[in-house]
């Protein structure tokens, strides 16, 4: 073979270990399709060649689909022709400077009316052209029918519909317009002389606290850290411009549904994608999924799409749907219900088939729009981390106030007195880590006789091992984490990570390790970017199970541990609590309980109590929020310039405070919510505006 071929292998996918260089195209009950460049890559099972030359197939089918410029012109003209219900926005730009366009449809498209919002996304993967055409067809048909079709008019009047036909413009141009068989975006990595990240492996993971579902947790051939791989995850979660743009859109809106279109396989799938365990809202996910699938007739004209949980197809991590569901539930408090539609019976159906494909998928889209309002009312909240907004101390009584983004039935409050530094040399068993796979080992050590070992080899059932601190610790500006590490990891294919998280759900890669350290290395990482926050630490090791290095060893880890953590009360029914303390310095955190159980802890907040005063340990200035008068009292020791941002990162206020004193700022005109006040040195304090 010179170019890629598409072959169908007649065996259940779960019975076959694929080579890591092949590309999976589609999965069926008793067969699967592969894209291969050599017949040597085909597993030893019966097979037949479906397409001999993929690039020749592209050239023969491309005229039945829009070029990228043609799509932009058409999409723009739809908005221009229907300004009363449509607004077009560019939410980001690709690496080669092409716009990522989104259209909002509503009876008042310039206004956020807090109506049920639905998102439709096309073309994560460059070669999956029908996904662009499907969402573009939605835009054209919904706008043309508005005012003429009663149901469509009612749905547009009562919903906010967001349409993003082409998330991967560079990949589409390279594949469709220029005639190359391609899947990823076109981000060039000079270090490896290779191009592209699989956008549907670049999201932030399931964020549900199960680290098997995090970004970059390898599931053999389906997820890869090798830059040239078809399923390359990227260097970190949301490393890519395209996924950043979609992430930011999703963070701005409370979507009830988020539907992403791919090809092919004729199925509707939903989370979780990384595990066979059901998602918490599996009943709703299944009901809507089956409702969608039953409304989409197959390309052949016989039967309808299959509906199933995503992992039943094959497990992945870092995909859009797992992140959308997990993030919306556990970090925003109300679930968005996401679905992947694997449309069509092939990558590029002939032009004569496209009209049938887009119309059938339109029927399912209308169904989702029609049930959005009722489903929005059925969403059960998760009690996300409250925000401590104020403290007062008078006559031995400390008063603590907090703002719950999602109110709970009751709250628990904990107190700690001190957070000294410790060196964990692994010389004895401790409760300083929660481990999945990592063990104390005497095989190698930097000091003493033991270290922590990743312990992942060909006999392991998992692809990812990790160890994480069970409790977050508060960070000061000068704090630094250090440790010693030794590693022997298959270069580029397998990875070790050192990561931090402010909530135990979203993880940030501080450093990654691959290849050989050729001895012990001592690492040091300043934590100034996390000053004023509380962080968890995690070591993670992921392998693709093809070639095993010895693994990674970690020793002499410098971290903070609390002297004691005392539960003050677990049955608080208000968001204000008073209790007796002696003058001193304390750290407090709070969490709430709801229908789904206890939610997540807030960050630790440091308070120093003196007679008549409770002050935060913020160098040079601190803010006390009066939730009754909606006035901020800012105590400042000297000149300071402060900026206030909303939760989306938009600056809403800027102030210059001169000299020493107390400045009062009214926030009565700001919408309720959580805000962040920053100074020029990066010091941050969170406050909440309530009504």
Image (spheres, helix red, strand yellow):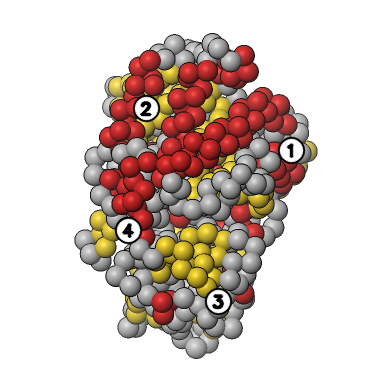
| Quadrant (top left/top right/bottom left/bottom right) for the N terminus | bottom left
Marks 3 and 2, the one that precedes in the sequence: 3
**What residue is pinned by disc 1?**
594
**Residue receiving disc 3:** 46
Rendered location of residue 279, percent (x, y):
68, 50
Q: Left or right: 188 with respect to 674?
A: left
Q: Is residue 94 left or right of residue 466?
A: left
| Residues packed near mark 4 inside 10 Å, few (<14), some (14 to 19) or many (20 plus) | some
Lower sequence index among marks 3 and 1: 3
- The residue labelled by disc 4 is 55
* Label located before the other in sequence (4 or 2): 4
Residue at mark 4 to residue at mark 2: CA–CA distance: 27 Å
Q: Kindly indicate whether the residue at mark 2 contacts the one at mark 1 (C-beta within 8 angstroms).
A: no
Whether residues under marks 4 and 2 lie with C-beta atoms below 8 angstroms apart, the answer is no
- Please tell me whether mark 2 sits on a helix, a strand or a loop: helix
The disc at residue 75 is 2
Depth check, mark 1 against mark 4: the one in front is 4
Looking at the image, which residue is at 44% across and 72% down? 20
Q: Kindly check if marks 3 and 1 are in contact, taking CB atoms under 8 A apart as contact.
A: no
Return the disc, 1 or 4, that comes first in the chain's sequence: 4
Q: Are marks 1 and 4 in contact (CB under 8 Å)?
A: no
Q: Nearer the viewer, residue 310 or 357?
A: 357
Q: Residue furthest bottom?
A: 443
The quarter in which the C terminus is drawn is top right
Alpha carbons under labels 4 and 3: distance apart:
24 Å
- Vertical order, 234 against 572 (above or below): below
Please identify, in this view, whether the residue under mark 1 or under mark 2 is nearer the observer. 2
Of pointers 1 and 2, the one earlier in the residue sequence? 2
Q: Position of residue 134 (x, y in %)?
A: 48, 37
Q: Position of residue 478 (x, y in %)?
A: 36, 52
């Amino acid at each position: 073979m010179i170019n890629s071929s598409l072959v169908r292998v007649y065996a259940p996918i779960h019975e076959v270990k694929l080579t890591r260089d092949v590309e999976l195209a589609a999965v069926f009950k008793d067969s699967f399709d592969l894209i291969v460049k050599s017949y040597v890559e085909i597993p030893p099972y019966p097979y037949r060649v479906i397409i001999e030359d993929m690039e020749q197939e592209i050239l023969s089918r491309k005229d039945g689909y829009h070029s990228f410029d043609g799509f932009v012109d058409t999409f723009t003209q739809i908005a221009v022709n229907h300004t009363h219900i449509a607004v077009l926005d560019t939410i980001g730009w690709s690496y080669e400077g092409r716009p990522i366009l989104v259209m909002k449809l509503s009876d008042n498209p310039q206004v956020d009316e807090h109506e049920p919002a639905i998102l439709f996304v096309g073309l994560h993967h460059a070669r999956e052209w029908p996904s662009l055409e499907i969402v573009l067809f939605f835009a054209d048909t919904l706008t043309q029918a508005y005012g003429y079709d009663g149901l469509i008019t009612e749905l547009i009047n009562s919903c906010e519909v967001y349409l993003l036909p082409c998330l991967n413009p560079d990949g589409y141009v390279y594949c469709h317009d220029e005639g190359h068989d391609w899947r990823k975006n076109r981000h060039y990595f000079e270090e490896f002389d290779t191009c592209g990240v699989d956008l549907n492996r670049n999201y932030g993971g399931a964020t549900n606290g199960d680290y098997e579902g995090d970004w970059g947790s390898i599931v053999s051939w389906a997820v890869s850290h090798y830059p040239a791989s078809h399923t390359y995850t990227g260097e970190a979660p949301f490393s890519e411009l395209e996924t950043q743009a979609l992430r930011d859109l999703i963070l701005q809106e409370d979507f009830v549904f988020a539907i992403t279109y791919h090809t092919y396989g004729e199925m509707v799938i939903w989370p979780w994608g990384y595990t066979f365990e059901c998602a918490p809202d599996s009943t709703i996910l299944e009901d809507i999924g089956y409702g969608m699938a039953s409304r989409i007739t197959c390309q052949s004209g016989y039967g309808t799409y299959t509906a199933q949980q995503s992992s039943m197809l094959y497990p992945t991590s870092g995909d859009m749907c797992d992140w959308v569901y997990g993030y919306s539930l556990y970090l925003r408090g109300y679930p968005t219900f996401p679905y992947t539609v694997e449309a069509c019976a092939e990558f590029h159906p002939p032009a004569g088939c496209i009209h049938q494909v887009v119309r059938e998928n339109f029927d399912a889209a209308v169904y989702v729009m029609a049930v959005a309002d009722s489903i929005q009312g059925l969403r059960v909240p998760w009690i996300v981390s409250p925000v401590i907004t104020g403290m007062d101390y008078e006559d031995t009584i400390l008063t603590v106030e907090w703002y719950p983004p999602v109110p709970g039935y009751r709250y628990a409050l904990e107190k700690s007195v001190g957070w000294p530094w410790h060196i964990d040399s692994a010389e004895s068993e401790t409760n300083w880590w929660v481990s999945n796979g990592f063990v104390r080992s005497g095989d190698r050590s930097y000091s003493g006789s033991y270290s922590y070992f990743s312990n992942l080899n060909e006999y392991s059932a998992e692809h990812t091992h990790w160890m994480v601190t069970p409790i977050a610790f508060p960070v000061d500006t000068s704090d630094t984490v250090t440790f010693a590490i030794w590693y022997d990891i298959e270069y580029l294919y397998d990875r070790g990570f050192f990561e931090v998280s402010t909530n135990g759900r979203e993880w940030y890669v501080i450093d990654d390790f691959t290849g050989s350290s050729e001895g012990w290395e001592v690492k040091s990482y300043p934590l100034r970017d996390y000053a004023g926050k509380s962080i968890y630490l995690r070591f993670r090791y992921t392998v693709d199970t093809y070639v095993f290095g010895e693994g990674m060893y970690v020793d002499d880890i410098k971290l903070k541990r609390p002297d004691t953590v005392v539960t003050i009360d677990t049955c608080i029914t208000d968001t204000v609590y008073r209790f007796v303390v002696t003058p001193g310095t304390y750290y407090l955190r709070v969490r709430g309980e709801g229908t789904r159980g206890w939610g997540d802890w807030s960050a630790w907040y440091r308070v120093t109590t003196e007679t008549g005063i409770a002050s935060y340990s913020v160098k040079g200035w601190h803010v006390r929020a009066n939730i009754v008068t909606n006035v901020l009292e800012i105590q400042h020791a000297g000149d300071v310039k402060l900026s206030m941002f909303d939760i989306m990162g938009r600056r809403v206020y800027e102030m210059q405070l001169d000299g020493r004193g107390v400045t009062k700022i009214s926030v009565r005109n700001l919408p309720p919510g959580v805000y962040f006040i920053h100074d020029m040195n990066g010091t941050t304090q969170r406050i909440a505006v309530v009504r």
